């Protein structure tokens, strides 16, 4: 059973006994009363400091001690900034003008003349004080809930990638339901069935279900539960399955998204309303995310097609573009870039040779060495690519333009077209240079056979600090196995 904490401050110990007697066995809203007794203001301060959740303070000081009482009340309200504890004053005589002012200033709940201090009067006065205290606490808690849920919304909608979005949403809901700091102890799962998939897959999972990420939803639920999750009509509300609470979202692109939460808490009506508001917002956000992802993937396809078109004119294979993009992406992650930057680089990298569209076929496909003029013409592809891409203000295309311009620059300043050196070359470009050369060495070109891995590694090591940025190369060697895998994933 919970208790209301009541502090009685009175110089007269007989008065304590009387109050204790009056409040003995008082139960209000299923909670009893626990009394703390203080004979002087300094004991009272000690109690308040240890128990900031004191619901009511009964202050009674005899004649000549009124100032001590007033000082204590001032301290509680002004210094302790405690605005919730209800103050009851036991008055020796009729209420004076000074006391009336005090009442307004410090929100004193009631004056009880000692002469009228029957147990019944004290109980009535205290119950009314507890009612006010409870209302204040509820409104404070609701205020806190509102703050948490709007903070959760803000967090969720700020993020860019879908997985980051889902992870933040789960953390925010858990912290809302179970309190901040407890979020990790509870699990949450997002499962998605896109229009081209037969079964929902777990896209994001936290807590004890984390290991199920990427698996089918049927691996998490036994088949009767699974059937119920899939067949429930979520337009009518969520589905409660024992310890699970399941929400369903239908996305405009035809996807279905399931949000499954561990459900152990009894929700108040208020919290249920807040959660419902959050669910509605989440639905809208998910909808936008999936539509946006559709547009994004169409854009990705177009960009790759463009890059491949340029590469395919030379003898280079179509997959070179994909591999350079993937390799650059992995290295950018290794360098600690964020999701937005690494994704942008992945796409932009695929356009590095776009300018080759302008180079005559005879030069691009020539076997053997290029003549001086032919090489000059070949070199122009970096500037041409830059000009083609620099017509857009979009950051993706500006990045791509810069990469097209600089991907043949060398760390030591011996590259082209401008002979830039070191960090004068954009980091994105320095990464793509490594990816481009690494991939070219391992594959057949018009003018060369594929090299074996140890020759490639020798070359890359030799060129570190010459052709390549040593910092980028640290990541290259660190992640070499992963980068090499890309060549197997997208073979010629
Ligand atoms: Fe190039
Ligand atoms: Fe290339």
Image: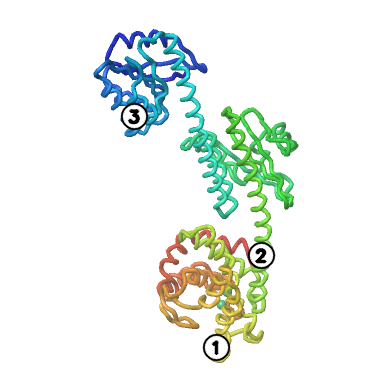
Residue holding disc 1? 376
Assign a secondary structure to mark 2: helix
Q: Dot 1: within a 10 Å radius of its alpha carbon, few (fewer than 14), some, or many (20 or more) residues? A: few
Instruction: Name the spot of residue 193 as percent of width and height, x first.
Output: 70, 47
| Picture quadrant where residue 308 is located | bottom right
How many angstroms separate mark 1 from mark 3 (CA)?
Answer: 84 Å
Instruction: Name the spot of residue 251 as percent of width and height, x first.
Output: 71, 48
The reply to whether dot 2 and dot 3 touch (C-beta < 8 Å) is no
Q: Front-most of 480 and 269?
A: 269
Residue holding disc 3? 76
Asked if residue 88 lies left or right of residue 71, the reply is: right
| Picture quadrant where residue 18 is located | top left
Q: Front-most of 86 and 316?
A: 86
For residue 299, which numbered disc appears in the image? 2
For residue 99, which numbered disc appears in the image? none
Q: Residue at (37%, 31%) from the top-left corner?
A: 105
Residue 30 at least partly seen: yes
Asked if residue 257 lies left or right of residue 415, the reply is: right
Pick whichever of labels 2 and 1 is earlier in the sequence: 2
């Amino acid at each position: 059973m919970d208790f209301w904490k009541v502090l009685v401050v009175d110089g007269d110990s007989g008065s304590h006994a009387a109050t204790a007697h009056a409040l003995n066995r008082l139960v209000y809203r299923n909670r009893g009363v626990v009394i703390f007794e203080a004979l002087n203001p300094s004991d009272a301060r000690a109690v308040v400091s240890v128990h900031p959740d004191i619901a009511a303070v009964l202050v009674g000081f005899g004649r000549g001690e009124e100032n001590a009482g007033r000082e204590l009340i001032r301290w509680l309200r002004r210094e302790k900034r405690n605005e919730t504890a209800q103050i009851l004053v036991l008055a020796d005589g009729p209420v004076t003008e000074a006391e009336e002012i005090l009442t307004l200033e410090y929100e004193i709940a009631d004056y009880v003349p000692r002469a009228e201090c029957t147990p019944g009067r004290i109980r009535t006065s205290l119950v009314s004080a507890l009612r006010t205290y409870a209302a204040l606490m509820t409104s404070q808690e609701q205020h806190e809930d509102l703050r948490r849920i709007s903070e959760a919304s803000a967090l969720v909608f700020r993020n860019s990638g879908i997985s980051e979005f889902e992870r933040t949403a789960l953390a925010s809901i858990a912290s809302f339901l179970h309190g901040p700091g407890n979020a990790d102890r509870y699990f949450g799962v997002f499962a998605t069935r896109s229009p081209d998939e037969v079964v929902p897959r777990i896209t994001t999972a936290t807590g004890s279900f984390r290991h199920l990420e990427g698996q089918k939803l049927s691996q998490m639920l036994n088949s009767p539960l699974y059937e119920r999750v899939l067949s429930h009509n979520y337009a009518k509300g969520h589905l409660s399955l024992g310890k699970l609470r399941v929400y369903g979202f239908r996305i405009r692109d035809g996807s279905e998204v399931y949000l499954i939460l561990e459900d152990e808490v009894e929700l108040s009506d208020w919290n249920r309303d807040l959660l419902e508001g959050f669910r509605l917002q989440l639905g809208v956000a998910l909808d936008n995310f999936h539509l946006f992802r559709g547009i994004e993937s169409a854009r990705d396809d177009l960009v790759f097609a463009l890059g491949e078109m340029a590469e395919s004119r030379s003898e280079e294979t179509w997959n070179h573009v994909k591999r350079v993009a993937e390799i650059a992406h992995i290295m950018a992650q290794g360098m600690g870039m964020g999701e937005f930057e690494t994704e942008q680089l992945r796409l932009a990298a695929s356009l590095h040779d776009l300018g080759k569209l302008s180079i005559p076929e005879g030069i691009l496909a020539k076997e053997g060495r290029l003549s001086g003029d032919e090489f000059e013409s070949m070199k122009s592809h970096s500037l041409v690519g830059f000009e083609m891409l620099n017509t857009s203000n979009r950051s993706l295309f500006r990045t791509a333009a810069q990469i097209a311009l600089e991907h043949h620059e060398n760390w030591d300043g011996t590259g082209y077209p401008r002979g830039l050196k070191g960090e004068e070359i954009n980091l994105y470009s320095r990464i793509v240079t490594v990816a481009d050369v690494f991939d070219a060495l391992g594959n057949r070109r018009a003018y060369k056979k594929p090299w074996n891995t140890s020759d490639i590694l020798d070359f890359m090591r030799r060129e570190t600090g010459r052709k390549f940025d040593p910092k980028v190369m640290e990541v290259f060697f660190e992640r070499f196995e992963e980068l090499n895998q890309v060549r197997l994933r997208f073979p010629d």
